[in-house]
Image: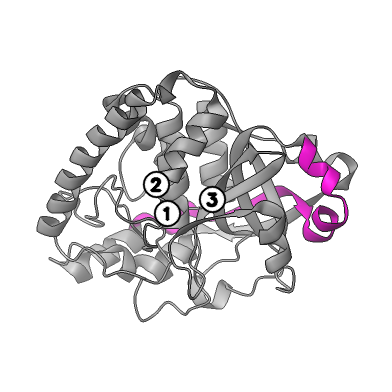
Amino acid sequence: MKSVVKPLMIILFAGIASPHVLAQVSSSAASVVIEHAAESELHKLFAKAQEHAVLSKPLRDRVDFFSAQFLGKPYLGGALGEGSTSSFDNDPLFRFDAFDCTTYVETVVALSLVSSEESFKSLLTQIRYMNGNVSLFTRNHFTSVDWNPNAERLGVLRDITRDVGSSQTSTLETLIEKNTWFARQAPDMVKAKDNEAKKIEYIRASTQSMGQEKARLNFIDKKTLVSNRDLLRYFPKAGVINIVRANWKVKDAIGTALDISHQGVFFERDGQIIFRHASFKRGSQFVVEIPLIDYVKNNFGDSTFAGINILGLNDLRF
């Protein structure tokens, strides 16, 4: 997560391969401080939501409310880990003072679907980890083959890209090589520095058998989005946008190819689809909002930016 990661690698997997905009948590003691502050902030968030009767409002309003609470918060790659007692990544399990793109999405989604503080912590864990088992090895690092399918199994999100794009939907195939990614990223995963060398080797040995997985990802290409804005009418009231990359030459840097580089939440407002996300762009490295079509147009010239994958948020309560 540090000097070995090039500026190109501003990507997901709960921030593991992302560069830091803020200083990372350097000790379990620092993580404990953040965890205590997060508990207090969580209580305040729910008190504010109850004051404004947010929890009984429609899903779109809940997403708008909770995502707005963090506008302006700084971007921090790898903002969350497995908690202060973890042997590997001892960053906090949740926090509200800084986000990377994935932890922002996870936090907003979990807040929008629960009615209590304890339910939030439980759902966030289920979204971030396979079967809710908190471990570096069960964290949903890869968006297309881990994170998306896990969220669908939970019933939290559903891939609706083809519902929106219909015949204008494209499909991207990408070979995700988990074992080589873990081998390359292992030194950056160990933030609890005692016995660091042994921990790095343990990560590499434990993930050798993970192998390869082919991702098939539906997306609407950027040209279609700009030329056929009527498609925006078919978006649901709230959900998640994944930014899709094609021919993204990152394997030599991180050990695998990737198909998704960024994500954020969306909701409808006055006929527009609003995109809120933890931005890592130079000069705006904090949580921001922008009309989705403007985001697409602003990034249109990036040759690797292929389009968007759309996940609809299900109005469930946990």
What residue is disc 2 on? 139
Q: Residue at x 24, y 41 (%)?
A: 41
- Counting residues from the start of the chain, the first of labels 3 and 1 encountered is 1
SS category of the residue bearing label 2: loop
Q: CA distance from mark 3 to mark 1?
A: 17 Å
**Where residue 147 sits: x, y (%)?**
51, 44
Quarter of the view holding residue 265: top right
Which mark sits nearer the N-terminus, 2 or 1?
1
Residue 224, quarter of picture: bottom right
Residue located farthest toward the left when viewing the structure as drawn: 29
Location of residue 242 in the rendering, given as x and y in whole percent from the top left corner: 61, 51
Residue 318 in view of the camera:
no
Q: Residue at x 34, y 76 (%)?
A: 2
> Is residue 25 shown above or below 197?
above
Disc 3 secondary structure class: strand
- Give amino acid for label 3: Arg
Q: Which residues are magenta?
A: 206-233
Residue at mark 3: 276
Report the front residue among 49 and 19: 49
Q: Are marks 2 and 1 in contact (CB under 8 Å)?
A: yes
* The N terminus, quarter of image: bottom left
